Each structure stands twice: as C-alpha cells, then as structure tokens.
C-alpha cells in the first residue's frame, strides 16, 4: 500500500506535527509513505525521518467560501504540482491534511481515493459541504469535530466519517529536563511557572491567560508566565500589540515572557509548573496531550476537544467557559499544593499513554486505509 500525504503549509502547527508523527509511524508499520509539502519546517523534518518528500507551493486560502476553490488553482504554479506528483508516485490513497489540500487534490480530477483529515471547527461551511460530497473518507480529530460535521454535511456522506483522535509521540517527552529547560529560557529555578502554548490567534484567548496571570501574581508575586507561540501567517499584528498593552497595564512586563522562536513543545513544556489553555471551541488541543506527556498539570476551558481529553479532577482540571477568575483560582490552589498537582500530573500521564499515543493513531489510520481500499475494490458503489 502506498499513501501520499499532502499539506500546503510547512510552518509548524499542530496539524503539521501530527502529520509528521503519523507519516513516521505508518512507515514503521510497512506502509509506503510519500509526502508533498512546501519547503520549510515540515518538509525538512519529513526528509530527516526518511520520508520521500515532493515540494509544492504554499497555499493557505482565507475563510471566504469558494475562495478555497479559486485559490487552489495557484498550486499549478508550484515547482512540482500535485497532478505531476500523482503521476510520478501513483499512490493507492491520497491523504489530504487540510481542507485546502483536499480541494487541490480533488482539483487534479484524480480517480485515486482521497481522505480528508478535518482538524478545524472554523471552516467555511459551503466549502466543507462540497468537500464532504467528494471525500471517499473523512477523518475527524475529535468527537467535537465529528459532531460539527454531522450538523453541516449531507446525511448520505456521514457514513464516510471516521473519528481518529489526535495523539502524540510519547517518546519525545521521555527525557524532560526541567532545570536545563528553565536555564535555556532564562527562568529562575525555584519560581512557579505558568505557561500557555498556542499560536497568536484571537480565538485561542491569550487575553484570558494574561488576565488570569495578573490574578495569580496577586497571590504569588514571584510567579513567572510564558506565552509560547507566533503570529504564524503574519495576520494578527494588531492582536499581538493589544496583548502586549494588556500585559503592561496589568503590571506583567517583568514577569511575562514571550517565546516566539520555539518549534517543538518538548523544548518549553518541561519548564512549566502548570499549563493554562483558555481557548473555547478548540477542535482537539494537541498541546494538552503534550503537557500531560511531559508531566505538566493542565487547566483548560471545558469546551470541544479538551473536555474529551481531560477527566476533570483526575487527569487535569476543566473550567466552565474558560473563566479567567476560576482558572486563576484553580492555578493558585495547585501551585500551593504540590501533592495535588503531582496527582494530576500522574493522572494526565496515564491518560495520554492509554488514549492519545501516536501509536494508537497510526493503528487506526492503517485500518481506515485498508477498509477504504477494500470498499473501492469490492464495493465501488459505496463510495
């Protein structure tokens, strides 16, 4: 079996890290994996892992309905187009890692079955409905995404949806070194550190994190805070300026550190005592699983993916509506009670090992591929 994974964004985000880990894991299971990705982080990491990678042009359509279909034509100007790659590789399945990638793959008019991996809850519904009609299989990264798809897609295509919850490579966190990580970030060894890891996008609610940080600091004046993430596509400069202003007005200029040059979470998470994740409508929340794997207790908004990942009070803490007052209250209580924090950390580590490992994801993806090829070969009318 040969599978071509396609992504049109090479900057490191959750979708790209998940694709990297899946490609490596599937290849280790004997599936021939080939990838197509723009030059950059993802392309380089795939090559380092021994995956054959073909270059394509970066393409990220805005949320404007059929703008996805219009901008997809730009891919034809790439040094190695998707159509050309398909003719060279001759895969059995194309795995599109985003809606845009799916639209481009289907735009080649290929008869090869295409899997659409849905990792977002904020897609243009018109474009998503059109994609749903054409996808041979649809993979939802969480129950929240599955429920959203069930609401917007035609009932006749719902049988094509498979829920494959995201996972993380647990081995990346086997050698977490708290002291070395703090030294690298210039953090004091004994101070409580509370962090947030998310790209600088307004819906991630960094403003709620800053508001919670100001409250935490009132009770724990020596606490330090980290916001790890970048304005990935250069679209939110005003948002970043507003956050910096908010932090300054809250008196956090000396205690809040911005980290925008970090590409892998294992380089920062070991430095944390707590991870705060205030985002609402989070499709999954990969960083939550990464923090659990690193042994860092998590406090998250009770919404979307996080509500499915965390068992409240056992493997993390959930806060209704991501209320920053309540998040601060819970954070202070845990920072003052190391034993309780340690219990949550242990529960989180156990939870992610059982339910959200990359090995589990790869097993499920391999099963999806096998079943799809069987359906295409023996029941062509089903698809």
Image (cartoon, rainbow, N blue to C red):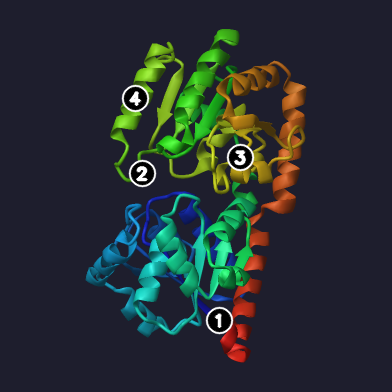
Total numbered labels: 4
Left or right: where 311 falls relative to 362: right
Name the quadrant of the C terminus. bottom right
Left or right: where 263 falls relative to 383: left
Element type where label 2 sits in the image: loop
Residue displayed at 45% across by 20% down: 256
**Residue that numbered label 1 is attached to:** 383
Q: Quadrant of residue 76?
A: bottom left
Comes first in the chain, label 2 or label 1: 2
Residue neighbourhood size for the residue with mark 2, other residues' Cα within 10 Å, grouped as few (<14), some (14–19), many (≥20): some
Element type where label 1 sits in the image: loop
Residue displayed at 37% across by 81% down: 109
How many angstroms separate mark 1 from mark 4 (CA)? 49 Å
Residue displayed at 67% across by 22% down: 330
**Residue that numbered label 2 is attached to:** 232
Left or right: where 349 falls relative to 206: right
**Residue that numbered label 3 is attached to:** 303
Is there a contact, CB below 8 Å, between mark 2 and mark 1?
A: no
Element type where label 4 sits in the image: helix
Residue displayed at 59% across by 60% down: 150
Q: Quadrant of residue 301?
A: top right
Question: Which numbered circle lies on residue 242?
Answer: 4
Q: Is residue 222 visible?
A: no
Dot in front, 2 or 1 = 1
Residue neighbourhood size for the residue with mark 3, other residues' Cα within 10 Å, grouped as few (<14), some (14–19), many (≥20): many
Is there a contact, CB below 8 Å, between mark 1 and mark 4?
A: no
Residue 274 on image: x %, y %: 61, 28
Comes first in the chain, label 1 or label 4: 4
Comes first in the chain, label 2 or label 3: 2
How many angstroms separate mark 2 from mark 1 (CA)? 37 Å
Q: Quadrant of residue 123?
A: bottom left
């Amino acid at each position: 079996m040969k599978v071509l994974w396609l992504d049109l964004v090479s900057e490191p985000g959750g979708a790209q890290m998940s694709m990297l880990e899946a490609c490596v894991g599937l290849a280790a299971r004997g599936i021939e994996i080939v990838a197509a990705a723009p030059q950059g982080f993802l392309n380089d990491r795939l090559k380092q892992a021994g995956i054959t990678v073909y270059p394509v042009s970066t393409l990220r359509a805005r949320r404007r309905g059929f703008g996805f279909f219009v901008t997809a034509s730009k891919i034809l100007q790439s040094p190695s187009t998707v159509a050309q790659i398909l003719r060279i590789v001759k895969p059995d399945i194309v795995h599109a890692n985003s809606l845009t990638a799916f639209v481009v793959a289907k735009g080649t008019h290929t008869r090869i079955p295409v899997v659409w991996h849905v990792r977002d809850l904020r897609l243009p519904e018109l474009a998503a409905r059109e994609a749903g009609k054409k996808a041979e299989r649809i993979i939802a990264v969480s129950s929240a995404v599955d429920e959203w798809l069930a609401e917007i897609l035609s009932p006749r295509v719902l049988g094509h949806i498979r829920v494959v919850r995201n996972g993380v490579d647990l081995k990346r966190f086997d050698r977490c070194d708290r002291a070395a990580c703090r030294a690298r970030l210039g953090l004091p060894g004994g101070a409580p550190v509370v962090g947030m890891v998310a790209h600088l996008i307004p819906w991630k609610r960094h403003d709620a994190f800053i508001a919670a940080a100001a409250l935490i600091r009132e009770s724990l004046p020596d606490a330090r805070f980290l916001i790890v993430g970048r304005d990935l596509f250069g679209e939110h400069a005003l948002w970043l300026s507003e956050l910096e202003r908010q932090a300054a007005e809250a008196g956090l200029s000396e205690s809040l550190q911005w980290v925008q040059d970090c590409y892998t979470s294992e380089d920062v998470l070991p430095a944390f005592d707590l991870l705060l994740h205030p985002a609402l409508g989070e499709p999954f929340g990969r960083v939550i699983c990464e923090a659990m794997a690193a042994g860092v207790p998590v406090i998250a908004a009770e919404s979307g993916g996080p509500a499915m990942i965390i068992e409240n009070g056992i493997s993390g803490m959930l806060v209704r509506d991501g209320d920053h007052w309540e998040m601060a209250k819970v954070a202070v209580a845990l920072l003052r009670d190391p034993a309780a924090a340690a219990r949550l950390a242990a529960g989180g580590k156990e939870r992610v090992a059982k339910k959200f490992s990359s090995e589990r994801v790869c097993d499920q993806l391999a099963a999806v591929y096998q079943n799809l090829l069987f359906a295409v070969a023996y029941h062509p009318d089903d698809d």
